[in-house]
Image: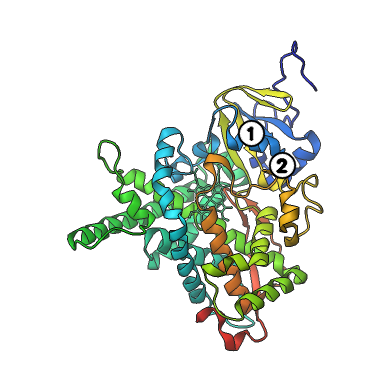
Amino acid sequence: MPTTASAPAPIRPPGPRGLPVVGTSFMASRDSTQTLMRWAKTYGDVVFYRFLNLHVYVLFHPQHVEQVLLGKTGNFVKGMTSRANPELFGNGLLTSDGDFWRRQRRLSNPAFHRESLVRYADITVEEAARLLEPWKNGEARNIHNDMMNVTLRIVLRSLFGSELGENMRIIEPALDAIMVSSSGFHSIAFYLGIPTPTRKRHFRAVAELDKIVYALIARGRETLKTVERSTASTAGAKDLLTLLLTARDDDGNSMSDQQLRDEVITLLLAGHETTALNLSWTWYLLAQHPEVEEKLYAELDAVLGGRPPSASDLPKLQYTDRVVRETLRLYPPAWRVFRRTQEPLKVGDYLLPAGSNIVLSQWVTQRDPRWFNEPDRFNPDRWGEEAAAKLPRFAYFPFGGGPRVCIGAGFAMMEATLLLATIAQRYRMRLTPNQRIKPLASITLRPKNGIRMVLQQRAGASDSRAASG
Ligand code: HEM
């Protein structure tokens, strides 16, 4: 409905009504991603819904995504992201806002600079080799567990200069418990504070993670003291934990243990599961697309010839990079983004009042046939330079965008490409029979019961031992 100078812009776009009093929410549905997709088809690019007293606008058009992420109009805060799991993320980088966030971001940025990434690339390749050591031709594995394990080791060593040994076994089940409580119906019960067993498991899991993280901080403080006592130089690339531990505000105060805990837990969670998911979904897609697999192998054989990859190979691993990008399009680990506008916001024909909650969905926008030809097809070639340049900005935003863009985007792309290159040189994977792989839309988009794969050693890979060199 076009607006004129005399008629004020309407504030209520079309959308599902839901139940009286309660309203509705896509998070409450059995299949949140499909619900969002259906809403987009039924109601268009701007959808309104109400859940209890929350007024929510879902924006699917790339221009509207841009408007929100770049924050040109209105003044956006994280909104539901920070309110959903305060006990988990606290006031860490993902959920904080304003000047406080700006300071913490500035402080963390150096840990993601190019020199640091080269160091993380070496760790990635070492950990990939360690992952492959026990693998055997013909065995079936839950490949998602493997990917979670390897990315956790990588983030721990890269950002915190630490290995957690036995604690690794606590982190994964704790994360599982947290993800269950943040999906579908459970997330609504959680939001409403209903004391379910899932909620109890969630808080137990957060307490277990806290214990591990506080130990990590204590160990970091000890290491720092030892370095200071030994008068060894602390110059050079510092890991994130050291940067956070040595940071001082204008009054010379350092961060409290609670704030350090919030930052560390955020990085630990944001920095490993997302990349693991990207790889798990990549193996799943490759297993069903032998034509893509063959092109990938051709590139790996030509560029690497059986040796382990390194950061300097990345510019040559173009097809490998496109496989990663295309998986991020079809299975975006971060499948929706929340914001709240603090000022009225004009979106298309509508004027959203200050205080409106906003949802953007990578899942829906990145599968929109207006921007992507044959959107459901796994086609890494669509990321050729020419085709990619024609895409509207923000038709694809797996890492978000604007000031709150993922701080680990470069790290994640490097890590995923090197892991894929190392593993795919050695193995082809096939899904074990009678499996239904179902995405569980929680904080991230994860395969509900993991992904079981049978390993098939690639011809010629046995003698080259590509990854263990
Ligand atoms: C494939 C992997 C990844 C994906 C898809 C992903 C996705 C995202 C997205 C969409 C956001 C923006 C959220 C928003 O706007 O509300 C974000 C933010 C963030 N990500 Fe990632 N991420 C990935 C990997 C990583 C890694 C490896 C790290 C760290 C090691 C990381 C740390 C963070 C942090 C700290 C933020 C908050 C940044 C801020 O607000 O300043 N992420 N990520």
Local secondary structure at mark 2: helix
Residue 133 visible in the snapshot: no
Decide: few, some or many residues near mark 1? Use Cα within 10 Å; few <14, some 14-19, many ≥20: some
In the displayed structure, would residue 370 be above or below residue 324?
Answer: above
Res. 86 visible in picture: yes
Q: Is residue 136 left or right of residue 59?
A: left
* Pointer 1 or 2: first along the chain: 2
Q: Residue at x 30, y 39 (%)?
A: 249
Say which mark, if any, is on residue 36.
2
Determine which of the numbered discs, if any, sits on residue 339 in the image: none
| Pick the front one: 448 or 42 | 42
The circle drawn on residue 67 is 1
322 or 25, nearer to the observer: 322
**Tag 1 and tag 2, C-beta contact below 8 Å:** no
Residue 217 found in image quarter: bottom left
Q: What's the residue at 57%, 59% (across, down)? A: 413
Q: State whether residue 357 is above or below residue 170.
A: above
Left or right of 150 on screen, residue 420: right
Where residue 445 appears, x then y in whole percent? 62, 52
Q: Depth check: give the residue in front, 194 or 402.
A: 402
Q: Residue at x 62, y 68 (%)?
A: 316
Secondary structure beneath dot 1 equals helix
Mark 1 vs mark 2: in front? 1
- Give the amino acid at mark 1: Gln
Amino acid tagged 2:
Leu
